[in-house]
Amino acid sequence: MPRLKVTQIRSKVGNKPELRDTLRSLGLKRINDVVVKEDRPEIRGMVHAVRHMITVEEVE
């Protein structure tokens, strides 16, 4: 199953609380944190919501 490597590149300060919660749900706590998640529709939706604060790569 494909996986997504998600890296936080911008600060969550100044964003809506819902977006901050989404970053926490993805497992991102600070700038340059990296998590690898399963490529599922739920994860894709969270990634889309905070796309301006992260970068995403597909990994095997």
Image: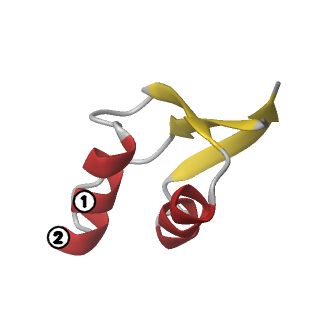
Horizontal arrangement in the rendering, residue 57 relative to residue 30 (left or right): right
> Which residue is at 35% across, 37% downward?
28
Residue situated in front as seen by the camera: 43 or 1: 1
Horizontal arrangement in the rendering, residue 16 relative to residue 27 (left or right): left
Q: Position of residue 52 (x, y in %)?
A: 54, 63
> Which residue is at 54% across, 35% downward?
7
Q: Position of residue 31 (x, y in %)?
A: 38, 33
**Tell me, what colour scheme is on the image?**
secondary structure
Instruction: In the rendered structure, find residue 7 and report the number of the disc placed on it.
Output: none
Question: Is 45 located above or below residue 38 in the figure?
Answer: below
Question: Is 19 located above or below residue 56 in the figure?
Answer: below
Q: Residue lying furthest front in this view? A: 1
- In what quadrant of the picture does the C terminus appear? top right
Q: Considering the numbered disc 1 on the image, is that residue within a helix, a strand or a loop?
A: helix
- Mark 1 residue type: Arg
Q: Position of residue 47 (x, y in %)?
A: 55, 59
Horizontal arrangement in the rendering, residue 40 relative to residue 13 (left or right): right
Q: Pointer 1: residues within 10 angstroms few (<14), some, or many (20+)?
A: some
- In what quadrant of the picture does the N terminus appear? top right
Residue matched to label 2? 17
- Mark 2 residue type: Pro
Residue situated in front as seen by the camera: 45 or 56: 45
Look at the image and tell me whether residue 43 can be seen.
yes
Q: Are marks 1 and 2 in contact (CB under 8 Å)?
A: yes
Picture quadrant where residue 3 is located: top right
Look at the image and tell me whether residue 16 can be seen.
no
Q: Considering the numbered disc 2 on the image, is that residue within a helix, a strand or a loop?
A: helix
> Which residue is at 61% across, 61% downward?
44
Residue matched to label 1? 20
The total of numbered circles placed on residues is 2
As measured in the structure, the alpha-carbon distance from the residue carrying label 1 to the one carrying label 2 is 5 Å
